[in-house]
Image (spheres, grey):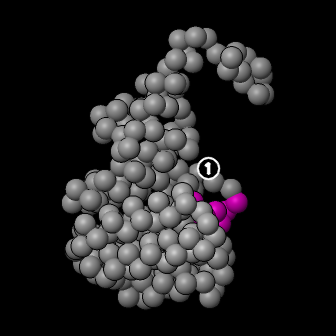
Amino acid sequence: SWACLRCCQVLTEPTRQAFERAEALLQDLPPVQRDLNALLSPKQSVFAHWHWLVNDALQRQCELMCHKNQPALAEVLAQRLVLNAERVLLPKHHPEKATAYDLLAQTRVAQHTNDKTERAKLVFVQLYSLLKIIEGANHPLTLLARQNALKPPTFAELLRQQHTHALAAMSAAVQRGNSKLVDVALARSRWVRRGA
């Protein structure tokens, strides 16, 4: 049975079933937008809006909107991810925050406007500050974020950067013998190539 670790209250059967339905919907790849909207509604959601499953679904939906050439909608989803990350994740310099900022910057670059490019530059500056503490000043991702903060990339340059890093991640995963990371890196590499 499902019980709270703090107060030991046991969930009723209908509430447990609601949680399981919500989990199943959020784990769809990618989640259906209307299901995601319903689950994010404060009146209908059984999850807190910062729950990891909600954020995972938001990230997948954001990437799908980028792939479907809907960067304005992707930006709204990425902004929500950043807000959730800032509200909840500890420590202050958490790797998931860097992921959220990176996604937000990418959605702004994808919109191909001067205003969005300048706003992306501000996000790349925040990303660089985070990565400098998380990864170190000389880490390749930190150096790339610094480069992008100084001169935001075009969308085509951003896609090339992602492709290069996906292949590097795949190579590192192969060396470590981690087949799951290889699958993720390969999928991301294919996504980038399709979008190019």
Q: In this view, does 150 lie above or below 69?
A: below
Residue at 48% of width from left, 48% of height from top?
56
Q: In this view, does 105 lie to the left or right of 10?
A: left
Percent coordinates x, y for residue 42 in the rendering: 45, 30
Residue 94 lies in magenta, yes or no? yes
**Quadrant showing the N terminus:** top right
Give, as a single range, the part of the protein colored magenta.
91-97
Residue 108 lies in magenta, yes or no? no
Query: Residue 116 is drawn in which quadrant?
Result: bottom left
Percent coordinates x, y for residue 83 in the rendering: 50, 54
Q: State the count of labels.
A: 1
Residue at 57% of width from left, 69% of height from top?
173
Percent coordinates x, y for residue 98 in the rendering: 54, 66
Q: Is residue 14 left or right of residue 110?
A: right
Asked whether residue 72 is in view, the answer is: no
Q: Residues within 10 Å of mark 1 (few under 14, many from 20)?
A: few
Q: In this view, does 121 lie above or below 85?
A: below
Disc 1 residue type (three-letter): Val
**Quadrant showing the C terminus:** bottom left
Q: SS of the residue at dot 1?
A: helix
Q: Is residue 115 left or right of residue 137?
A: left
Q: Name the residue under label 1.
A: 88
